[in-house]
Amino acid sequence: MTWTLTNTSLDQQQLLVNESLMFLGNGYLGVRGNFEEGYSSDYKTIHGAYINALHENVAIQYGEKLYGFPDDQQKLVNVIDAQGIEIHIDGERFQLFEGDIISFDRNLYMDQGYSERIVHWRSPKGKEVRLTFRRLVSFVIKELFAIHVKIEPISPIQTIQVTSTVNGDVTNYTEEGDPRIASGHAKLIHGNTAWKEEGYTKVKAHAKRSELEVACVTAYDVNLPDVDASHEAIDHRIVDTFTVDGERVFELTKYNVYTDTLRHEDQLFERGVSIQQNISTFEDMLTQQRTYLDEFWKVTDVEIDGDASLQEGIRFNLYHLLQSVGKDAVSNIAAKGLSGEGYEGHYFWDTEIYIFPVFLMTNPEIAKKLLMHRFSTLDDARERAKEMGHRKGALFPWRTITGPESSAFFPAGTAQYHISADIAYSFIQYYLVTGDEQFKQIYLAEVLFETARLWAATGFMKDGKFLINNVTGPDEYTCIINNNYYTNSMAKYNLEWACKIYGQLETDEVSSRLDVTEEEVDTWKEAADHMYLPYDEEKGIHAQDDSFLNKEVWDLENTPKDHFPLLLNYHPLTLYRYQVSKQADTVLSHFLIEQYADNDIIRRSYDYYEKVTTHDSSLSYCVFSIMAAKLGKEEKAYNYFNETARLDIDNLHKNTKDGLHMANMGGTWLAMVYGFAGLRIKETGLHFTPTKVEKWKHLTFPIRFHDRLLKLHLADTTMTYELVEGDALTIYHHGEAVSLEAGQEVKKDI
Ligand code: BGC
């Protein structure tokens, strides 16, 4: 059943994990997989519903606040709670923790876009019912979260009572002791109004400082004519009660429509009601989900023959990326997507380096939305560059929602200047994959020029080398260092492309608006040509930075297992003093811009950095898998890949309860496509250097490129290239040009 995730555990820890695993979303709205009927008092739950980008601004409390530290942090808000549906059977409240569970099924259908719980329950007093809860967050009507409940009496029952709540007075989740979760500020929104009007339950809440508002308009549908319905407003909640005699099957559908002031101006209730009027039945919504997902999977599904558990993991990861990725220009994809509150709904470089490529190669229209969101934050990035003392340029924030820096810990936050080059890199990739000339002239040009300016302003020429000091690379266990190889190489690439695109401008619209002159472009060229890429002669590898290789090597072998992740057990300064990497750094650069180092260096680098890397960040495994595949280390490539594919399903990092690891999920796809199939996007087109994978019979996946749809099939010792749709195309197999005609397959030995 690789399209269905099933988990029926009622174990406390697993229930919390399941709330993330079974979450439903559509990129706009995300709802955790909480039980409608609630929990017994000794059970903990992380109850949540989130609207992408809907946030509050919270003042950061510093012990010592220095110049340029951000005043506020944006935090994703837990919005109005519309999940609650309590059920009383002849006065006894249904709960999974009381009475007898005669049978229990819980599934998430990734091909059909809904989740389901079916419970055959015997109450403490012996009443028996079968309850079916189905819920969906619509991919077609983005504001809609619907729940369908069916109550089937099995033993004689007199009365069934259902009370459904919409609550505007919710709090966010907090936990002390883990920097990856918020530790205070639980109350981010406040209920304003809650009433019932013209058959609709209307609840509104607001965040005080961001002044954003959210509303929920709820309507109900019941299958029986003689239902006794009433409602009650209690504080910021509306409770609707439905009472029926218990002889017949009772079905209730709850349609919740969310609106917010980022997208629906200040017409929240009006827009909510008009959306409600276009909703048909729950069954129709299910059909729409199916149609939407058929289209999605046609261009996205990856098939692995020979390992059902991996297959499940891959589909799960792709499905959840789709459920979380922002599809409008005001949102992006948070580190935990819309599945939980870890990292507070912030967008990081995770988007550009780990997630964007998946959409770029499968659903480029969604990929473009991600770029447009970043583009919309350029003014904030320009302002931040100034605040950080640069004359010009754009410094993108390490973590943000709408643009301002939200990181309070600058050594592993703002100092990660590489995010600006990562964003530039993704803009270049979009151009290479779509060939969109208009995009190049407008968006690519502006982003490249402003980021090139940042590098020119941050670094300086000394003894014929361009140096970039006091930055942090991807490895967060090594902070504020000089000449991080990853940063410098990405900056070099960024600068080279800025010069190239300047030379290809068809009008001077962008350059004159930004006041870019030829003299300035010459300085970018000089910086790119002389960019210092630290190299250690003795080891024959690129040094992670100027100091890394001179530090004492951390004794990973003798570090107790329960001291990982190190960040939860050692002061940052302790970590900074050692050669120990949280995640792929130099090795990642050798993947993204392999042309800057030869294969021998890349091999030695891999061997060296592998020994000092803890993979405490889930962003690490996929990179090592990709590079192991490139270097012919098949077993390692497979093992690292395995760590990514089921990381959340199997809760390998022990924090899936706080949300799913979106970047890692993208990484699974990267490991297959860039790793095993060996894809690289170059200016000359698509290049493949596939690797033999003995564990599976075959690996099949589609990709989009320049308006074409291709299907790749990697089996045993051959790779088959099929051009499914679009004009003839030349691709490269181990450097050899291969011409493809529409509808034609070409098979090549690996
Ligand atoms: C990683 C970062 C990442 C962040 C959000 C951290 O643990 O070190 O690279 O951006 O998590 O996923």
Image: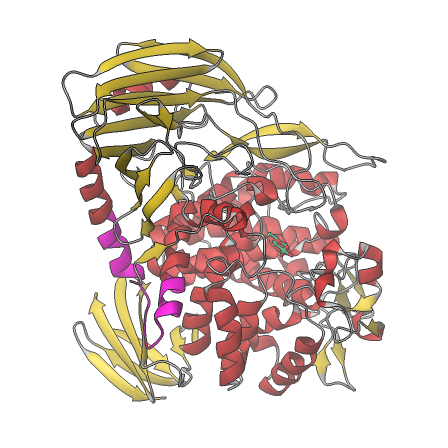
Q: Is residue 560 above or below residue 659?
A: below
* Dominant secondary structure (helix, strand or loop) of the stretch shown in magenta: helix
Where residue 732 sits, quadrant-wise, is bottom left
Please state if 447 lies on the left or on the right of 100 as rendered: right
Answer yes or no: is residue 307 visible. Answer: yes
> Which residue is at a point 68% across and 59% down the rendered structure image?
523
Where residue 240 sits, quadrant-wise, is top left
Please, which residue is most extreme toward the front here?
125
Question: Looking at the image, what colour scheme do you see?
Answer: secondary structure
Q: Is residue 153 above or below residue 4?
A: above
Of residues 707 and 140, the one drawn nearer to the viewer in this rendering: 140
Q: Is residue 310 magenta?
A: yes
Q: Is residue 738 above or below residue 126?
A: below
> Which residue is at a point 40% across and 83% down the rendered structure image?
693
Indicate the quadrant of ligand 1 in the picture.
bottom right
Of residues 256 and 683, the one drawn nearer to the viewer in this rendering: 256
Please state the horizontal and vertical placement of residue 722, each as a whole percent of the image.
24, 75
* Quadrant location of the C terminus in the rendered image: bottom left
Please state if 342 lies on the left or on the right of 120 as rendered: right
Please state the horizontal and vertical placement of residue 646, each as a whole percent of the image.
46, 63
Please state the horizontal and vertical placement of residue 719, each as a whole percent of the image.
31, 83
Please state the horizontal and vertical placement of residue 482, each as a whole percent of the image.
79, 63
Please, which residue is most extreme toward the left here?
225
What residue range appears in magenta?
Answer: 292-314
Please state if 605 lies on the left or on the right of 218 as rendered: right
Of residues 520 and 682, the one drawn nearer to the viewer in this rendering: 682
> Which residue is at a point 63% across and 66% down the rendered structure image?
615
